Image (cartoon, rainbow, N blue to C red):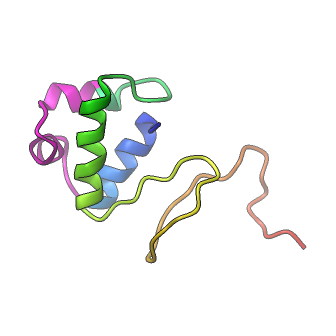
Amino acid sequence: MITAAQMRAARALAGIDQKTLAEKAGVSVPTIQRMEASDGNVRGVIETLTKVIDALNACGVEILGDNQPSTGGGRGVRLMQPGSSGTPAK
């Protein structure tokens, strides 16, 4: 699963606009707009969502799910758990 916020953030990290993502994924701009406007998890046809995720991966963006470790190196962004202080445990 991918959330609308993850999708917007991934696109921003890739430095591409909605039109470019749509072209790379082979979907329409209104499809990208609907996905990014979703509440919570993106809803839609699995095949379309897979195309979008593949396009983001091709741009060098790795989509991480809850509690999923990163398989690659490089910089990244992850939301903290609600209530987390953001400081390492002692």
Q: Quadrant of residue 33?
A: top left
User: Per the image, is 31 magenta?
Assistant: yes
82 and 47: which is toward the camera: 47
Please determine whether, in this image, residue 57 is positioned above or below residue 53.
Answer: below
Q: Residue furthest right?
A: 90
Please determine whether, in this image, residue 56 is positioned above or below residue 77.
Answer: above
Q: Position of residue 70 (x, y in %)?
A: 52, 65
Q: Quadrant of residue 32?
A: top left
Please determine whether, in this image, residue 13 is positioned above or below residue 65.
Answer: below
Relative side of 21 to 41, left or right: left
Q: Position of residue 19 (x, y in %)?
A: 12, 41
Q: Quadrant of the C terminus?
A: bottom right
Residue at the spot 36% in from the left edge and 52% down from the top edge: 10
By secondary structure, the bulk of the magenta-drawn segment is best described as helix
Q: Position of residue 2 (x, y in %)?
A: 44, 39
Please determine whether, in this image, residue 52 is positioned above or below residue 42.
Answer: below
Q: Quadrant of residue 50?
A: top left
Q: Residue furthest bottom?
A: 73
70 and 11: which is toward the camera: 70
Relative side of 84 to 42, left or right: right
Residue at the spot 26% in from the left edge and 32% down from the top edge: 47
Q: Position of residue 83 (x, y in %)?
A: 79, 46
9 and 65: which is toward the camera: 65
User: Per the image, is 22 magenta?
Assistant: yes
Residue at the spot 54% in from the left edge and 47% down from the top edge: 65
Q: Which residues are magenta?
A: 15-34
Relative side of 2 to 53, left or right: right
